[in-house]
Image: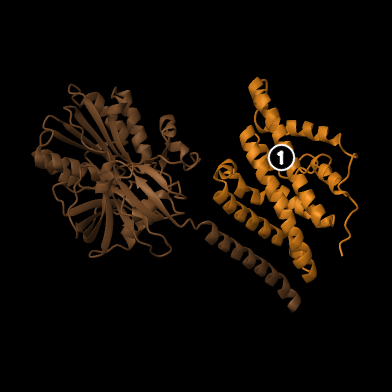
Chain colours: A brown, B orange
Amino acid sequence: MSAYLVGPLAVAGISTVLAFFIALLDKFLNNYGELKVSINAGKKELTVKGGAPLLGTLAEAGIFVPSACGGRGSCGACKCKVKSDVGPHLPTEMPYMSPKEISENIRLSCQIKVRKDIEIELPEEFFSVRKYKTKVEKIRDLTYDIKEVLFALEDGEIEFEAGQYVQLVVPPYGEVVESVQRAYSMSSLPSDKRHVELLIRLVPGGIATTWVHKHLKEGDSVELVGAFGEFHIHDTPATMICVAGGSGMAPFKSMLYHMKETGAFPQKDIWYFFGARTTKDMFYLKEMGELQKEWPRFHFVPALSEPKPEENWTGDVGLITDVLDRYLKEKVDLSKGLEGYLCGSPGMINACINVMKKNNMAEDKIYFDKFA
Amino acid sequence: MIDAPNVGLVSLFFASILTSNILLANFLGMCSFISISKDFKSSMGLGLAVTMVIGICSAVCWAVLYFIIKPLGIEYLSFIIFIIVIAAVVQMLEMIIDRFSPSLYMALGIFLPLITVNCAVLGVILFMQIRSYNFLQAVVFGFGSGAGWWLAIMLLAAIRTKLDANNAVPAGLKGTGITLITIGFMAMAFIGFSGMIAVQ
């Protein structure tokens, strides 16, 4: 009997001893003590615990650098300038850096660790970004996989521009052991400073979207961080060509109602192309239709790529890129110039940029919010 | 207690680099050898990492072999135990380098964790076991084999850089094809060393 036990016990024993050494080494090596972070040449000084990535360290101190992916190094949004030496750029940072940024030592704050006193530069507006305590006021199903969630702010008011986004703080749940943050565009009006509305589509396997769809209930407390983002209406007379799919509706809902409500940018004509596969994926048809009726300079073009005969779809049919191409060639008035506004999956955005460029739209006049 | 072969340490060191080169005589550790040898800088980093890991692992595994495995009579588990030890040593090495030499950590990058599954490491340890080296021989053989691997990948990187610069390789042979042929020639060249000094 003992002969059978010796082997497994020996393997288990060796593994335990090695694991113990690794844990010991980790505790000893990753203890950097208290370090200083100096922001904008000493305007702000933080004392932080060393060893963690800069992004999280700053967030703990209440300074929120934008990050759409929540620190996984896949969005490249959390760039900041580092003035002290933190070593050369990491392979994980390189894809997001231009040669100019590398020479200025711009870094991804989620990838570099705080290991000694560090000096960084951040835009002043980051200091106005803050965390909001909210309660879920209402959850509504827009389609089978998109929910409209309305958050009521409990402390203070949020100032933002139509098109900007907030980060939703997802607490640990089920098998998810760490709190994560994910970015969502606000679909609510900037004038309603006590509410934030988000449109959230269920992504199979997505940590945040699964939480929203399966766990979040009305009355729950949720934290939001914001507002971030460069996506906004540009103050020119050019006609807006907006293209969205799925939950990419969010920033446009905010922009459109904002323009309608305030009469802002009165010279702008607006074309809004919204693509879906079937009527099951389509939403806000009634709202957008009414908006179009009341507001002559707004044109709404919903399109289905795979309508079934029994759906009796009377609108446009085809991939949103084909519909866009057709309208740009035949229907849209080009005399005031065009500006592109895109929100959706990277695939859709890249395809739309190609169509717009082929129709002689300038690439620097195409603005987008890409959610990877 | 150990019936160690009668080989001097110096000759063992050079024998493991030249006559019994772990790569070109035993053909171990091939995958990273072929895929990483495109440029000098990565080859340098990988060679250094392999040398360190093989050297340290053969010392640690020697101790594990003669103080745990043999006394308990569990030689049949030695493969599993060696792999566990290699993985742990690589993990610790990674943490130590990360803390004390970020620039070296940068240079090694992804290669260090990859070495865990490099068969050259396990191969050297198993040779050490069947040839029943004593402790010093095991360490010298470990570092020697690592240095041999390092030498081989640097040579291959040099040849590949030259080949790429000339652009004389037919399209169908480019990449892995010409690399394998090159390795074959290198192995033949290294056979020229055979018989000069022996590892056992």
Please name whichever residue, A195 or A359, is drawn nearer the observer in this view of the structure.
A195
Query: Which residue is more in the foreground, A113 or B91?
Result: A113
Q: Position of residue B194 (x, y in %)?
A: 88, 38
Image position of A325 with respect to B29: above or below: above
Determine which residue is flagged by label 1: B150
Mark 1 — on which chain does it sit? Answer: B
- Horizontally, residue B68 falls left or right of residue B88, namely right
Residue lying at 66% horizontally and 60% vertically, measured from the top left: B84
Query: What amino acid is at disc 1?
Result: Trp
Q: Quadrant of residue A240?
A: top left
Q: Quadrant of the C terminus of chain A?
A: top left
Q: Is A54 positioned to the left or the right of A15 in the image?
A: left
Please identify the quarter of the rendering in which residue A232 is found: top left
Residue A364: in sight, yes or no? yes
B13 or A317: nearer the eye?
A: B13
Q: Is residue A71 visible?
A: no
Describe the element under mark 1 as helix, strand or loop. helix
